[in-house]
Image: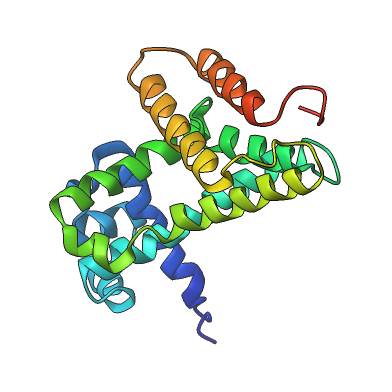
């Protein structure tokens, strides 16, 4: 009896092969043929699941988002239960910051996508900034909850404060990958700015 093919698993196998190439060599090197070789499957099979290179790029981006979301969830869970709004913000931002091998891989892979979008504005239009926008809204909701609880200045503009923290985190990530500072120094800077929004003594971290 022929073995039943798990199509979702096969798509993921191919998509994650592209992500590995993006991490090590950049997306310019991720041709359909190269992805097939990395995944250990035929070019025909890659083309069966992803009809075009753009479909492969965007489909793989969803898998990258799942990996980052799982890391964020782990970081928040490790801070205790139930997490405070500050725990959620802290756990999310420290999960993004490239302080270990997993986060460095995720950051480099996202950077490969950003670099590609600079040359392919049509891709930016197609997938937009859905994930970053969702993260901003999610974290702004946490800040507003802390404001309602009296833990954060009620006059603070939550969306602007969160956008600043994310921009800071991304900038710190680049400085770590570029060798300007190590992960511990970047974490100290991020914590300092987070404490300006969530004054120490009002939550666990």
Side of 140 where 111 appears, left or right: left
Q: Quadrant of the C terminus?
A: top right
Extreme residue in the left direction: 119
Vertical relation: 126 (above or below) 191: below
Q: Quadrant of the N terminus?
A: bottom right
Vertical relation: 139 (above or below) 196: below
Identity of the residue drawn at 24% across and 74% down = 44
Total of numbered circles in the picture? 0
Side of 28 where 131 appears, left or right: right
Q: Nearer the viewer, residue 77 or 203?
A: 203
In the rendered image, residue 53, in percent from the top left (x then y), is placed at 21, 66
In the rendered image, residue 61, in percent from the top left (x then y), is placed at 39, 58
Q: Nearer the viewer, residue 95 or 9?
A: 95
Side of 53 where 11 appears, left or right: right
Identity of the residue drawn at 44% across and 41% down = 106
Identity of the residue drawn at 54% across and 41% down = 162
In the rendered image, residue 187, in percent from the top left (x then y), is placed at 57, 21
Extreme residue in the bottom direction: 1
Extreme residue in the right direction: 81
In the rendered image, residue 97, in percent from the top left (x then y), is placed at 51, 31
Q: Nearer the viewer, residue 25 or 93?
A: 93
Q: How is the image coloured?
A: rainbow
């Amino acid at each position: 009896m022929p073995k039943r093919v798990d199509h979702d698993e096969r798509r993921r196998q191919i998509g994650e092969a592209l992500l590995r190439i993006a991490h090590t060599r950049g997306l310019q090197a991720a041709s359909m043929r190269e992805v097939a070789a990395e995944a250990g499957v035929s070019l025909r099979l890659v083309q069966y699941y992803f009809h075009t290179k753009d479909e492969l790029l965007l489909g793989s981006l969803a898998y990258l988002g799942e990996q980052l979301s799982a890391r964020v969830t782990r970081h928040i869970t490790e801070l205790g239960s139930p997490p405070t709004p500050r725990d959620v913000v802290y756990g999310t931002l420290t999960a993004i910051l490239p302080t270990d091998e997993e986060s460095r891989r995720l950051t480099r892979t996202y950077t490969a996508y950003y670099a590609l979008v600079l040359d392919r504005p049509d891709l930016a239009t197609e997938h937009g900034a859905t994930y970053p926008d969702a993260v901003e809204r999610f974290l702004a909701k946490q800040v507003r909850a802390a404001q309602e609880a009296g833990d954060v200045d009620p006059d603070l503009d939550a969306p602007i404060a969160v956008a600043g923290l994310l921009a800071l985190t991304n900038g710190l990530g680049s400085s770590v990958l570029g060798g300007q500072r190590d992960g511990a120094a970047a974490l100290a800077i991020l914590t300092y700015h987070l404490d300006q929004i969530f004054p120490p003594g009002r939550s666990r971290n």
